[in-house]
Amino acid sequence: MQILDQEKEQRIVPLFRLGFRPFFLAASMLTVVSMGLWGLFWLGYTQASQWMYGNPIWWHSHEMLFGFTGAIIIGFLLTAVQNWTGAPGVRGWQLAGIFACWLVARIAMMLASPHWVWMAFDLLWMPLAAYCLGKPIVLRRQWNNLFFVPMLLLLTGVNAMFHMQVLGWLTVSTRSIALVAVMAISLVVLIVGGRVIPFFTWRGTQSEQITRVKWIEVSSLVSSWLVLLALLLVPFAGGWQHSMERQLLPVLLVVTAMLHLVRFARWRSLSTCRVPLLWLLHIAYLAMVIGLFMFAVYFAGGAVEYSIALHVLTIGGIGGMVLAMIARVSLGHTGRELKVGPMMVMAFWALVMALLARTLFIVMMPEMRIAGYGVSALLWASAYGVFSYVYYPVLTQPRVDGRPG
């Protein structure tokens, strides 16, 4: 059986032997191009807007949330399900088909104008992935991981709202829809981060195992789900929306941030300072906590700008977690040593600098806001450009240990 499986594996192009390979690589390349264009747009090269689906703000929000982050989530889940269930992950032509739907939509978002055909392509790849994810989970009765399936369907619904809005079929603002997507993605990041960061820290620092306290785990995730539920009502809440934002959301966000801060405080972050694959994970999780606090202040009518809170959460939290995770997962699932070189350390620092340029720099020097936008985007593109260059051979060649995957 092992010989037959190995022969079958050898007939599959290495790029399509497991979900992380095409999605990690292509999503990283996509964000280099898209954020490069976005940075040039803000630095004065306004012709870049012709590649932005006719609506730069919509395009930037949508492609970063779904084209980039959504692809990373799918790549991670289609890879992780193999470990959870012991069943082979989707691969070969099935994986290539899901990826092709994603790729067609991405090309259309840059070369075409809004049309229902491109919406159809963009609403297909995530449900197909959800089916491939859910089938082995149900067969193996891994019920604790089944919630990822409805989460992907929820993200598909939010994606549909994005498209209906740009097509003029929906009058809800881009900001309201994007905030729901950001919080849904943040919930996935917090759940996955809470599972893997303590384990990675324990193994990476060769220290005492970090235990999980049940009441902290449960309460932090319950409060996160409540924040998402409250925000799901925002696009449809009408006049009640403002009352909810002033009263309910700030309380939920503060409680959620405090619970995640308690969770984070137990992970011995200082021990990771000399391990690049770990310290960025910890910085990213802390940025998630700070972003939640800042959103609480914003919704309570405080002095924090919406844009600043948003980008602490998205660049520092989601972006940092993604870069650290795909760097580690790609090494582990290709049989390589869990260690990065100087170029990837530079990429990690470039992402941290992108966060500071988009937030702290703008707060301290508001007259340089536009420059901050452009510099931050180019630093982000540089970080993921380095990843794309360093990891291209890792993701496109067979495992170094000869095993499938």
Image (tube, helix red, strand yellow):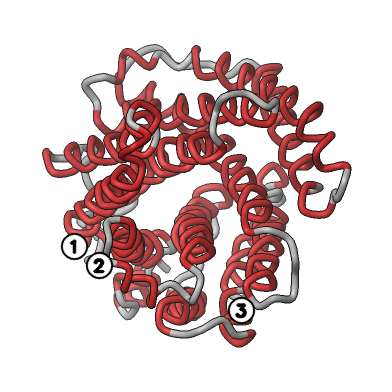
Up-down relation of residue 297 to residue 146 (above or below): above
Q: Quadrant of the N terminus?
A: bottom left
Residue 396's disc number: 2
In the figure, is residue 195 to the left or right of 183? left
Between 360 and 324, the one lying in front of the other is: 360
Q: Are marks 1 and 2 in contact (CB under 8 Å)?
A: yes
Element assignment for label 3 = helix
Label 3 – label 1 distance at C-alpha: 32 Å
Residue 203 position, x and y percent, is 35, 25
Up-down relation of residue 262 to residue 99 (above or below): above
Residue 223 position, x and y percent, is 73, 28
Camera-near label (3 vs 2) is 3
In the figure, is residue 16 to the left or right of 195? left
Residue at 58 percent of width and 43 percent of height = 188
* Residue 181 seen in the current view: yes
Q: Amino acid at mark 1?
A: Pro
Q: Amino acid at mark 2?
A: Thr
In the figure, is residue 239 to the left or right of 163? right
Q: Earlier in the sequence, mark 3 or mark 1?
A: 3
Camera-near label (3 vs 1) is 3
Residue 212 position, x and y percent, is 58, 19
Residue 391: quarter of image: bottom left
Residue 119's disc number: 3
Q: Which residue is mark 1?
A: 393
